[in-house]
Image (cartoon, helix red, strand yellow):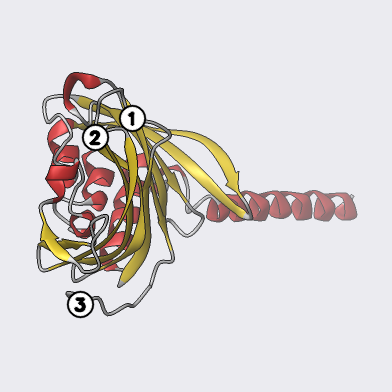
Amino acid sequence: MDRVRRGAAALAALAALTTTFAACSDGGGEGSEETPEDVLAAAKEALDETSGVTLSLTTQELPDGVDGVLDATGVATRAPAFEGDLVVLVNGLEVDVPVVSVDSTVWAKLPFTRSFSKVNPADYGAPDPARLMDPDSGLSSWLTAATGVEEGDRVRDGEVVLSSYTGTLPGRVVDASIPSADEDATFPATFRIDEDGRLRAVDVSGPFYGPEGTVDYTVGVDDYGTDQDISAP
């Protein structure tokens, strides 16, 4: 009988230990679980603290008659500064434009020219790409401005597993980063966060170029910790 009692006590202790271990594995219990808003806030902090990243902005197509950005890729730093290349649709033609942005001034090497000149990116339906690194009005501000945030499916991007979070961005927030966006509209967005809690991509849709139609942009974020000295050309 004593052996039976000792066996029952051992089983009870094992069950208690298993329950405790499971609670610790879940982050300390239900009360300490991160909400979707917590996840996005932590991703904002990670983006705001990094020295630099590789940024991309892409869309498959623009509405008929619209001049704007089809593709942009380059290095963005905390300065904030940017150096990269834009593919701009102008009068139905795709134009490759090397771009440098430093101290709120944008230089571009326009078609049929050999040197950089100062430009107003809004003339080409483009944002100042360096502004996407501004903690208050750039890409990271989207993470904490999204409303109705819900966790979605996990997706695999090569060897990386990303968690998806959907929400809605106010137009004024998107417009602060991309001035061609309609500040009175709303923009459905899907944020993709990696296993280290960092933003890796945002899919965002809405009227980026007035009433001409909806544009679907994907903003990619990679190479956290990039350190590059970008100077005016």
> Percent position (x, y) of residue 151?
44, 35
Q: Quadrant of the C terminus?
A: bottom left
Question: Is 150 situated above or below 30?
Answer: above
Mark 3 or mark 2: name the one nearer the start of the chain.
2
Q: Identify which residue, 21 or 218, lies in the foreground.
A: 218
Relative to 18, say whether 190 is above or below.
Answer: above
Which amino acid type is marked by label 1?
Leu
Residue sitting nearer the eye, 182 or 148: 182
Report whether 215 appears left or right of 163.
Answer: left
For the residues bearing labels 2 and 1, Cβ distance under 8 angstroms = yes
Check disc 2 and report its element: helix, strand or loop. loop
Q: How far apart are marks 1 and 3 (CA)?
A: 32 Å
Report which residue position mark 3 lands on: 231
Question: Which residue corresponds to mark 1?
Answer: 62
Tell me if residue 189 can be seen: no
| Towards the viewer: 198 or 119 | 119
| Quarter residue 10 falls in | bottom right
The three-letter code of the residue at mark 2 reads Asp
Image coordinates for residue 215, horizontal then vertical, percent: 32, 29
